[in-house]
Image (cartoon, rainbow, N blue to C red):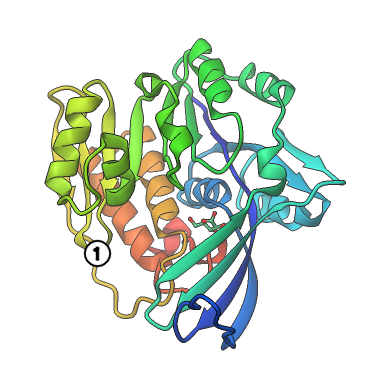
């Protein structure tokens, strides 16, 4: 069984700020750093650093070669990653506040230029029982999902960042949703202020045949198996100081998937994923804050 992550790779430009910039305000940053990021890249790193074998497919420009090196250093197989020298790599402008919260502006760049040929060539190398992991930062999700399902793959979909395009996809083809509460509410069509039990019940009702993994921030995470499958909740791990929450969800997803494919129970997988994301939020940055298994 192989894992393919078809996902974004970004250059994260991170400003540490006293507060998020307000309309019309010019704000001096306390520091500026550049990190590897992108939900796709972060999730592949989390999978690889937890010990899983993962293939990463996607697209970068000539300015993003260091992202490929970072993936390869952690053992990610990048044979399906396209390098388009004339294009700009995707990038994120991130503000991190003193409270450790972030807000992000994304420029898709090469992430949005994946071609049908790239998709077909990549997916043809995978088959029944293999897993496809997807987020919502690349183009042509519909075609990728269709090709994957045709190959017999199981689709794990993290619809982040959540946008209108997600609701136009044939989501019945998805095996497992990985969402936070806001994404879950949007997917289920309930108010974002709803409590997580309401969101989960609405998701279960709308997508009865899909597994649901919902991260709940400081409250923990909950998994509800398809149909009448088990529901498992784990609380979040204690963290002494939240430095930067960027990539916490990505770390959780990578670790959870890695644990489940190697046969761990859902409860064990949630607990390990929770520990890994607690580690992630105690360090600044995205890719660099994703722990290796021996650091947990
Ligand atoms: O999930 C965190 C990621 O979101 C960042 O690394 C940034 O690139 C954006 O894609």
Tell me how many marks there are: 1
Left/right placement of residue 169 relative to residue 275 reads right
Corner quadrant of residue 295: bottom left
Left/right placement of residue 110 relative to residue 125 reads right
Which residue corresponds to the image point at 48% horizontal and 51% vertical from the top-left?
46
Query: Is 177 above or below relative to 270?
Result: above
Helix, strand or loop under label 1: helix
Which residue corresponds to the image point at 47% horizontal and 19% vertical from the top-left?
153
Q: Is residue 284 visible?
A: no
Which residue corresponds to the image point at 83% horizontal and 51% vertical from the top-left?
62
Image x and y of residue 230, in percent: 14, 32
Image x and y of residue 224, in percent: 19, 35
Question: Which residue is under mark 1?
Answer: 218
Q: Quadrant of the C terminus?
A: bottom left
Corner quadrant of residue 141: top right
Which residue corresponds to the image point at 22% horizontal and 26% vertical from the top-left?
206
Left/right placement of residue 296 relative to residue 222 reads right
Image x and y of residue 253, in percent: 39, 46
């Amino acid at each position: 069984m192989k894992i393919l992550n078809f996902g974004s790779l970004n250059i994260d430009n991170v400003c540490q700020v006293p507060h998020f910039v307000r309309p019309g305000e010019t704000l001096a940053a306390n520091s500026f750093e550049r990190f590897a990021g992108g939900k796709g890249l972060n999730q592949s790193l989390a999978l690889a650093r937890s010990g899983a074998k993962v293939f990463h497919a996607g697209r970068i420009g000539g300015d993003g070669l260091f992202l490929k090196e970072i993936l390869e250093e952690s053992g990610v197989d990048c044979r399906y990653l396209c390098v388009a020298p004339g294009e700009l790599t995707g990038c994120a402008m991130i503000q991190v506040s003193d409270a450790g919260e972030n807000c992000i502006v994304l420029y898709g760049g090469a992430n949005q230029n994946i071609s049908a040929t790239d998709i077909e060539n990549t997916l043809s190398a995978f088959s029944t029982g293999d897993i496809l992991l997807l987020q919502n930062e690349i183009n042509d999700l519909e075609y990728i999902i269709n090709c994957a399902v045709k190959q017999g793959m199981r689709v794990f979909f993290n619809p982040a960042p959540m946008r209108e395009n997600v609701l136009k996809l044939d989501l019945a083809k998805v095996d497992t949703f990985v969402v936070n509460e806001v994404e879950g509410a949007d997917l289920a069509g309930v108010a974002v202020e709803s409590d997580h039990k309401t969101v989960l019940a609405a998701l279960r009702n709308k997508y009865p045949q899909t597994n649901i993994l919902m991260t709940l921030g400081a409250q923990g995470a909950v998994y509800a198996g398809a149909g009448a499958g088990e529901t498992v909740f784990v609380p979040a791990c204690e963290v002494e100081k939240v430095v930067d929450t960027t990539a916490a969800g990505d770390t959780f997803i990578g670790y959870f998937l890695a644990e489940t494919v190697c046969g761990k129970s859902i409860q064990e997988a949630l607990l390990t994923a929770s520990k890994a994301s607690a580690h992630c939020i105690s360090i600044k940055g995205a890719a660099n804050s994703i722990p290796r298994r021996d650091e947990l």
